[in-house]
Image (spheres, rainbow, N blue to C red):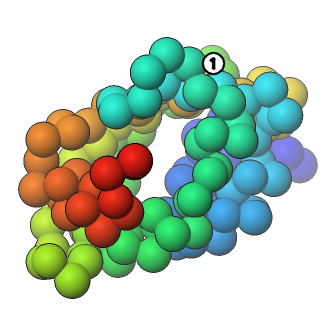
Amino acid sequence: MSATPSELVTAFLQAFMSGDVEKASGMVSDDFCFRAPMHQGEGSKAAYFAGAERKTRFIHAFRILRQWTQGNDVCTVYEIDVRTTEGSATMAMSEWHTVRAGRVSSTYMVFDSASRAATLLRNALGAHH
């Protein structure tokens, strides 16, 4: 039996946030696209996963606060705990994923790019992120 859209999205987020980028990448379609703060326009699968192992090593906890599903669309509100050599902080995030043919086909990510956690991540990764 195949996963429901919410089960797939939850598994995708858990894999990505835990640093299992290979597993997360296998759960998205080849034509996966995304929109996110600090990224201009629509990004590709390659852009989404570029440097993901490096980014996710600073995520030390991931908690889903609420999730809604309507057909193949899943909206998830969650928190991540970020820890770098400069300190730690929690950031609330939201993503709207669309599932198509048993794979995540897109996401629209929302978070406060000026939050302490975002600043910690940006500083840890360097100015190009």
Outermost residue to the bottom: 85
In which image quadrant can residue 61 be found? bottom left
Q: How crowded is mark 1: few (under 14 residues within 10 Å), some or many (20 or more)?
A: few
Q: Position of residue 7 (x, y in %)?
A: 63, 48
Residue at 46% of width from left, 64% of height from top? 55
Residue at 69% of width from left, 56% of height from top? 24
In which image quadrant can residue 23 be found? bottom right
Residue at 22% of width from left, 52% of height from top? 118
User: Relative to 1, does residue 45 appear above or below in the rendering?
Assistant: above
> Does residue 34 show up?
yes
Q: Which of 119 and 19 is in front in this view?
A: 119
Q: Where is residue 2 in the image (x, y as percent from the top left)?
A: 85, 45
> Does residue 121 show up?
no
User: Relative to 128, does residue 81 appear above or below in the rendering?
Assistant: below
User: Relative to 2, does residue 16 appear above or below in the rendering?
Assistant: below
Q: Position of residue 64 (x, y in %)?
A: 36, 54
Q: Is residue 58 left or right of residue 49?
A: left
Q: Where is residue 13 in the image (x, y as percent from the top left)?
A: 54, 54
Residue at 25% of width from left, 76% of height from top? 83
* Number of numbered discs overlaid on the protein picture: 1
User: Relative to 33, does residue 14 appear above or below in the rendering?
Assistant: below
In which image quadrant can residue 15 be found? bottom right
For label 1, the residue is 71
Q: Which amino acid does label 1 sit on?
A: Gly
Q: In this view, does 50 lie to the left or right of 70?
A: right
* Local secondary structure at mark 1: loop
